[in-house]
Amino acid sequence: MSIVLFENKKDCCGCWACYNICPKSAISMQQDNEGFNYPVINNDLCVECGLCQRVCPIKTAVQREEDNFNQKHIGIINLQYTENYGAVIAAAVLESVVRNIVGAEYIVETFKLNPYFPFKNRFEFAKDKAKSLGGWKFYFNDKFKHSQPTNADKLRSLRFTSFRYEFLNESRTYQNADEIKKSPVNYAAFITGSDIVWAPKKVDNFRADMHFLKFADENQTAIAYAPSIDSVVNKKLKSASLLYKDALRHLDSISVREKSSVDFLQSLTDKKVYECCDPAFLVEPEYYDKMISAAAVKEDEAKFIYVYILEINDEIVEYANKLAKEKNLKICYYSKFHKNYSVNSEDCTSDGPAEFLYRLRNAEYVLTNSFHCVVFSLLFKKQFLSFTRSKISIKSTDLLDKFNLSERIITSDNKIDIDKPIDFDKVDEVIKNMKNDSLDYLKNSLAII
């Protein structure tokens, strides 16, 4: 009897795990008409060892749930349908913290969501991808020039899969809120956050039901842990007030990640709106040692600058080259656009979450326009600079305001010496207070389940 990975391709997340583990190279990843890759088994080469089925995160999650249907579950919803370092690491931390709070009585799992699969939602996927890449021009360049994943892309996907397998307890794959609602799993509570799941564009489209937990029934506790709006309260946001007001009705406990969003949300509900920190701050820096130990990084004695760029930013590259020459340092960089540095450099685009943490832990300096790079620079006590991005974002500015470190955001009007000392004792004190307040919120919210 030949191996069957899935009956319907909607049950596959396209993670490449089966392709990478097959000892006989019997699995190929083939594109469908919409550009998504799915595994196809060559039965002439397959020896039916079953490794592909055992490594599949979807099949193992379904079997695990079927074995534990009667036990109470707590489901956490965040952005796990994208390969984003900060989102995956923060999800692993939140899951671990919740598990420590509720104990063995509950199974805590992170939802495996794939809301882009239905054809009608593919434009939403393309629109989000275009924004993350820097515009439609770069989306189409990325799509047509790189329709087949590079070796670095494949390795990165494999490392994400391995990281999730080791540090996340993932659910089966769900496409929408209706599938969650009809699930046979005994969910006692749901938690949404802390990613950018409450941005205005996500309030009135197909993701709103999931990210505001509208599907939860009266016997299921609905908790928002530090989701982000990541938008200034402007006319566009105010125009969505009625949608937010309706969405907030479904939540038993409400918190948000940015302080600047608290007043806006509080004006729309009688329930108390709390400010909570990103999950990455909920644990001590030593917590990440185990994750870092899983990194497949070749040890290099050369000291380096870690450059992490989410969109085109020539200013960061220019600054990195200048700093590297001045300090006689290597550059380790992650960027889809900037590949040519004038000094010794290493392309880190194949890194997984563990490697990402390794770079941040061991870097001499960090240059970035990423929120979570700033978070871990604070946790790991790194000299860093945060550069502004093209779109309006309050994540990093709001965060650094808390630490009185707004001067480390580089704009055309603001330049600072990266070696200017940071008072990390004060940083630690702020983190401690944020952590304690946020843990209290989680404990109180989970106490009612």
Image: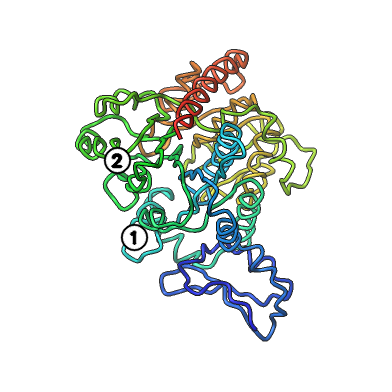
Q: Quadrant of the N terminus?
A: bottom right
Residue 403: percent from left, percent from top: 50, 18
Extreme residue in the bottom direction: 44
Residue at image position (24%, 35%) is: 245
- Residue 211, by quadrant, is top left
The structure residue drawn at horizontal position 59% and vertical position 61%, both measured from the top left corner, is 63
Q: Secondary structure at mark 2?
A: helix
Q: Is residue 273 above or below residue 292?
A: above
Tell me the residue at 54%/23% (across/down): 435
> In the drawing, does residue 227 fall left or right of residue 362?
left
Percent across and percent down for residue 285 are 66, 28
Residue depicted at x 63% and y 26%: 382
Per the rendering, the mark at residue 83 is: none
Instruction: Label 1, secondary structure: give it.
Output: helix
Residue 292: x and y in percent read 70, 40
Mark-to-mark CA distance, 2 and 1: 17 Å
Q: Is residue 173 above or below residue 363?
A: below
Q: Quadrant of residue 327?
A: top right
For label 1, the residue is: 121
The answer to which of 33 and 241 lies nearer the viewer is 241
Residue furthest toward the front? 70
Dot 2 or dot 1: first in sequence order is 1
Type of the residue with mark 2:
Pro
Mark 2 surroundings: few (<14), some (14-19) or many (≥20) residues within 10 A = many
Q: Amino acid at mark 1?
A: Asn
Instruction: Say left or right for 411 vs 307.
Output: left
Q: Which mark is residue 200?
A: 2
Q: Nearer the viewer, residue 196 or 387?
A: 196
Picture coordinates of residue 199 (x, y %)? 34, 40
Q: In front: 96, or 88?
A: 96
User: 416 and 51: which one is in front?
Assistant: 51
Q: Quadrant of residue 10?
A: bottom left
